[in-house]
Image (tube, rainbow, N blue to C red):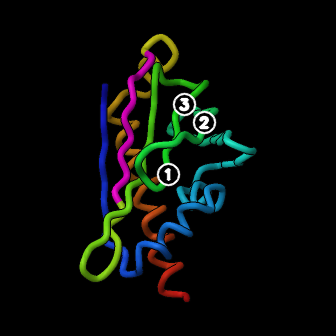
Amino acid sequence: MESITLSRLVEAPPEEVAELVGDVETFMRAAEFDDATVEGDRLRIRNGVGLATVELDCELVERDCALACEQRDGIFESMETRYELLEREGGAEVRATTEFAVDVALVGEILDATVIKRQRRKELEAQFDYLERQVTDT
């Protein structure tokens, strides 16, 4: 199992940040995916990564955090992402963790764990940037 965790302090009350994260479709689009749609408890993501197009069908799941989703169908053997909000002096620390197992038969040599981690880091940073822009615009 591979894992990547990033965090950032967002200078806003945790409740305000939670509201932004809770608008799941907008928050996922902030990751700069090619497409992200939410229907009920389903999240569908499509994104070009290098030469490959990654399509994931995820389920929004209940965890002890602000937002969590698990892959139901896609390129990984398994994948889960959790977003935690931690109250800190000066705002809310947003901590995102993605754990995944690469399905070598499906992914092959095009995408390996290093490429996936690099891409995921870009996506999470874009989401954190979005949160910062939203709280400074209000």
Residue at 39% x, 30% y: name it: 100
Magenta span of residues: 95-103
Please identify the dominant SS of the magenta region. strand
Q: Which of marks 1 and 3 is in front?
A: 1
Considering the image in quadrants, where does the C terminus appear?
Answer: bottom right
What residue does disc 2 label? 59
Residue at screen point 33% across, 78% down: 91
Residue position marked by numbered label 1 in the rendering: 67
Q: Is residue 55 visible?
A: no
Q: Which residue bears the numbered disc 3?
A: 71
Kind of element beneath mark 2: strand
Residue type at tag 1: Leu
Of all residues, the one furthest to the right in this rendering is 39
The kind of residue tagged 3 is Gln
Q: Mark 3: give few (<14), some (14-19) or many (20+) Cα within 10 Å.
A: many
Which corner quadrant of the image does residue 4 belong to? top left
Residue 121 coordinates in the image, percent (x, y): 37, 50
User: Disc 2 marks which amino acid?
Assistant: Glu
Q: Nearer the viewer, mark 2 or mark 3?
A: 2
Question: Is residue 50 shown above or below 22?
Answer: above
Q: Quadrant of the N terminus?
A: top left
Q: Mark 2 or 3 closer to N-term?
A: 2
